[in-house]
Image (tube, helix red, strand yellow):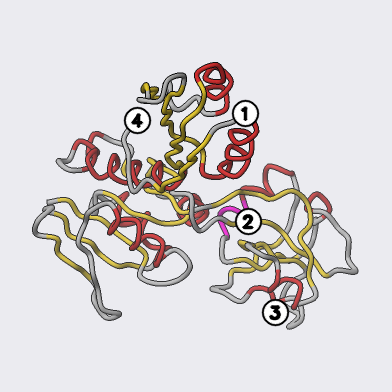
Amino acid sequence: MLNIALPNKGALSDGALRLVQEAGYHCDRSRRDLAVLDVQNDVEFYFLRPRDIAIYVSNGVLDLGITGRDLMLDSGADVKELLPLNFGKANFCYAVPKEDGRTPDAFDGMRIATSYRNLVREDMAERGVDAEVVQLDGAVEISIKMGVADAVADVVQTGRTLDQAGLTPTGAPILKSEAVLIGRTDEAQAVNGVQLFIERLRGILLGRAYVMVEYVVPQPQLPEATEITPGIESPTVAPLSKDGWVAVKAMAREASVNTIMDKLSAIGAKGIIITDIRTCRI
């Protein structure tokens, strides 16, 4: 049986649960469930604190887990990132009071409040900066006002919380984080079902990133049309009963769909249809 950890709460929880459900796994849970058994797929899902997941996976208690890249790296656990999941994106960065203006390279002698002690210590060491790391479990933004820190290091999505606390990011982000699928670094990845789980998730992620574009176009415009929609390998082209016209079908990046439609219309394409892709394998 495959044992997989999912975040039990926080920003990563809903996205992780939705992803595995879309991939065909049954893990409906109530708020109090600590584990859910998917008999059909021979998988048991455990709902754990995101910060603890890398530790459980590295110790061999669990085969796989979904957590944040920042939490994985800060844990120091012997695990590796198997697949980025494209949700829960945030920057891990330093912040100081708006009137301060100092950059991380000038943090010598300062106190830095954070929930990510190891990441900050490693970064300070790489910079050659001697700063004190103040370990807090959360709400680090208030630490400067409370007098226990001079700067903070935390994950930032919109920056609204920092702004409300009178803080501003300084320096380049230490790390660009997102939800990731993690596994052990040894041969334990050969456990039955691991590769299938990875491929199912990858199929959902590809389906979210692409759409299917279908249209008809005059034969003379086909070369130009296929440049607009080249597809993954190449588009599917089929003749129509109407002389001089062909039907074209191709996958395209969802983010470019409106530009693609504009360009196809400009060369005389008709009946342009865009459909979502639920999942796919490439």
User: Is the residue 10 above or below the residue 202 in the image?
Assistant: below
Q: Which one is closest to the eye, mark 2 or mark 4?
A: 4
User: Is the residue 179 above or below the residue 231 in the image?
Assistant: below
Identify the element where label 2 is drawn: strand
Q: What residue would you read off at disc 1?
A: 267
Residue 151 placement (x, y as % from top left): 75, 66
Magenta segment, principal secondary structure? Answer: helix
User: Is the residue 42 above or below the residue 193 in the image?
Assistant: below
Start-end of magenta stretch: 117-121
- Considering depth in this image, is 2 or 103 the residue closer to the camera? 2
- Considering depth in this image, is 166 or 235 the residue closer to the camera? 235
What residue type is disc 4 on? Ile
Going from N to C along the chain, the mark reached first, 3 or 1, is 3
Image position of 36 (left or right of 77): left
Going from N to C along the chain, the mark reached first, 2 or 3, is 2
> Mark 2: few, some, or many residues within 10 Å (few <14, many ≥20)?
many
Going from N to C along the chain, the mark reached first, 2 or 4, is 2
- Considering depth in this image, is 74 or 12 the residue closer to the camera? 12
Q: Do the residues labelled 4 and 1 touch (CB within 8 Å)?
A: no
Q: What residue would you read off at disc 4?
A: 282
Q: Distance between the residues labelled 4 and 1?
A: 29 Å
Q: Distance between the residues labelled 1 and 2?
A: 45 Å
> Mark 1: few, some, or many residues within 10 Å (few <14, many ≥20)?
some
